[in-house]
Amino acid sequence: MAGLSSLYEIYKKDPKFVEKLLSTVVDVEEKLDGSRFGFEVREGNEMKFFKRNDSVPLTKIDRTLGRYYEKAIGHFESFNDEKLSRFPEGWRFGFEYFPNLVPVKIAYDRIPLNHLVLTDVSVRDPQGKILEVIDDKKTLDQWASVLECEGPPQVFRGKLSDDQKNKLLDFLNTSEEKLDEKFKTENFSKYFLKTLNPSLGKSFMQNSLDKDIEALVFKFDGKNPLKVMNPVYRMQKEKKEEDDKPSDIYSLTLVFLQEFYQDLDFRKIKLKGKTFEERYLEFISKTFTMFCKSRFYKNNFAEGVDFELPKFLTREEAKLNFKFVTDEETQELLKKSGTNRELFKIMLASMRAHKKRPFGVFKKELLWHHNQLVDKIADYINSGVKESFLTYDQFREVFLVTENENEWYEYGVGKLNEISFPTYKEVKKPSRETSSFVETLRSISPKPFLPSKDSEAATAIICETVPYHAGILTALKDAKEATGNKSILCMTGNPFKSMETFKEMSTAFLNANKDLLHTVVILGYPHFDELRDFANHGNLRIENLYCDKRIADDYRVQTGEDVNHIDCNDNLNKTKIVDHLKSGEIDKFKKLGLPVTHNFFYKLKNDLK
C-alpha cells in the first residue's frame, strides 16, 4: 500500500467527486505501520524475497549486513516442496512485516502471526512487469491461511450510513491546523473505528482504541484506494528526523579503507565461489582479515571505536548476520569485538556501492576515487563468475547501484558526472590533530558498561518460552550442582498473544526458587548482547551457558565472550506441555507442569496465539 493518495487532498480539489465515491460500496482497512516485505516462488521451487525496493531480490550480502528480515525469511524457508508447489509462478505476495513491536514509528501491543500481514498479491510477467494486483479481503484471507500469516485488517464493508458519511465529511471539511489541534486531545482510532464499526473495542494490533494507528484505507467498489491519515502520525512524520547521515567517524574509516585497498594486489586474492554473491562475500572476508593485520588497523582500530550508529542500527535486527560468513579466520576476528563487526559491515556495504555526493571529510575527490575502486573490485570479482545468472549490465544495476533503507553507509547511489579530478596520490588527505584515530575519537567514545570486580558469577539457562515444567527445574538444579552458581533463566520466543499471565507465573516461579535463580528474562528473540548487558547491569557475569550447543556458539559469536558450555541433556525440550495446553488436556498438563503452573492453565490457554 505504499504511495497511496490522500482522500483529504482529493476532497480539497474535487469535493463532489469524493461525495459521489462515498455513496458507493466502501471497504475500509486499517493501514499498518510495518516494513514492506515480498515473497515469490519461481521455477523449481526457488524462493525470492524482496524489501521496499521490490525490483531486486534480497541477496546474501543484504542478509549478512543485518538480520532484519530473517524472521520472515526463516518462516518461508520452513515450507516443504509440496507446499511451495501450491504457489503460482509469477505471483508475488506482499506483506506488512513486524520483526518487533516498533518496526517504524508506532509501538504496537502485539505481533501478528509469524510477524506478517498479507496486504496484496501482484501477478507479474517473466520480466517482472505487474499485470494484475489482487487485494480483495476474501482472496487474501484464503492465501493468508496457506501462508500461515494474518489477513488484512478490515474495519468496514458496505454502504456508509448518513451519520457515517457526515462524520467523514466533517473531517474532510476541517483545515489541517484545526485537525492537528483536535486530535491532540481526541483519539483518531476511537473517532473513526467506533463510527465505522461500533462493536470494535480495539484496533487490529492494539489492545484498545486509545492507542495510535497510522491511517485508514478506503476502497470504493473494490478499487481507487485512498488513505485518511491520522493527523498525530502525520505531524510526527513532518517533524525533523534525527540526523542519520554518515558521521565523520564513518567517513574517516572510508579514507583508511581506500588507502588500504589502493595498495592491495587483487591478483593475490584467490576466490573459489561461482556466483558474484559468493565471491564478493569471500573477497570481503579475505580482505577484512588482511586489513585487521595492517598498520591501518593497528594504529586506528585495535583499541576499539564507537561508530556513532543511529539508534535504528543498534537494534538486534540490524546486527551482523553470521549465516553466510564461512571463513573461519574472519569469524574468529568478528567474535573479538564490536569494532571488528562494524568494520566488516562497512567494508561489506561500501565496497559494492557507488556514492553520489560528498559527506563529512569524504570530499568529491575521494568520492570519485571510491567509485573507481568499487568498479575495480566488481570487475575483478565478476571476471571469475563462470555460471553467472546475470548479464554484465544487470550485474552492474543490481550490485553497484544499491539502495538499503536500513544502512546509512550505503549513502546515495549512482555515479558522479565524469569530470577531471586529481589522482589519488595528489588528493589532500583529511587533516587530524593526532596521529592516532583512536586518540582523536577517545573523547566522544563512551566506554561500555562492565560489571565491578566483585560481581557474582552466574549461569545462563537458555530455552524456549514454555510453561515451567520439571525439565526446567532439573536444569536449574543441575546448573547449581555443576557450577555452584545461581542461574539467569532466559526464555526466548513467544507462543502467547500477551505475556502478562506468563510474567505473573514467572514471578511465582522465581519466588519459589530463589536458591537456584537470580532472575527470569523473557526475550522475543535471542538478543545475546542484551542478555549479557542485562546481567552486567545486575552486577552479574555470565560464566556458563546451559543450553543447546548451537545456541552456545551463537552466544559466543554475538558477544565475543568464550563462556563454558554445559550440555542440557534434553531437560529443556519439553514442548509437549504446550500441546496439552492447546488441546485443553488439563490432567496431562498438570502431570508435566510444575505446581506453580497449575492455577494458570485456563489463562495460559486463552492467551495462546
Image (cartoon, helix red, strand yellow):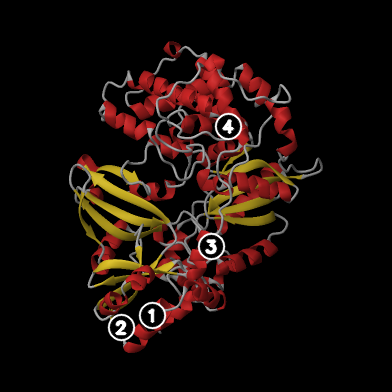
| Amino acid type of the residue tagged 4 in the rendering | Ser
Residue 345 appears left or right of 584? right
| Amino acid type of the residue tagged 2 in the rendering | Leu
- Residue bearing the label numbered 3: 236
Q: Are marks 3 and 1 in contact (CB under 8 Å)?
A: no
Residue 368 in the image, given as x and y percentages of width and height:
47, 25
Q: Secondary structure at mark 4?
A: helix
Q: Relative to the observer, which residue lies in front, 311 or 44?
A: 311
Q: Considering only vertical position in the picture, is 448 above or below 208?
A: above
- Residue bearing the label numbered 4: 251
Report the mark closest to the observer, 1 or 2: 1
**Circle nearer the N terminus (4, 2):** 2
The answer for how far apart the CA atoms under marks 1 and 4 are is 50 Å
* Screen quadrant of the N terminus: bottom left
**Which residue is rendered at x = 55% and y = 14% of the image?**
425
- Residue bearing the label numbered 2: 160
**Circle nearer the N terminus (3, 2):** 2
Q: Secondary structure at mark 1?
A: helix
**Circle nearer the N terminus (1, 4):** 1
The answer for how far apart the CA atoms under marks 3 and 1 are is 22 Å
* Screen quadrant of the C terminus: bottom left
Q: Are marks 4 and 2 in contact (CB under 8 Å)?
A: no
Residue 470 in the image, given as x and y percentages of width and height:
56, 58
- Residue bearing the label numbered 1: 168
**Circle nearer the N terminus (4, 3):** 3
| Residue 320 seen in the figure | yes
Report the mark closest to the observer, 3 or 2: 3
Q: Quadrant of residue 174?
A: bottom left
Residue 69 appears left or right of 14? right
**Circle nearer the N terminus (3, 1):** 1
| Amino acid type of the residue tagged 1 in the rendering | Leu
Q: Are marks 1 and 2 in contact (CB under 8 Å)?
A: yes
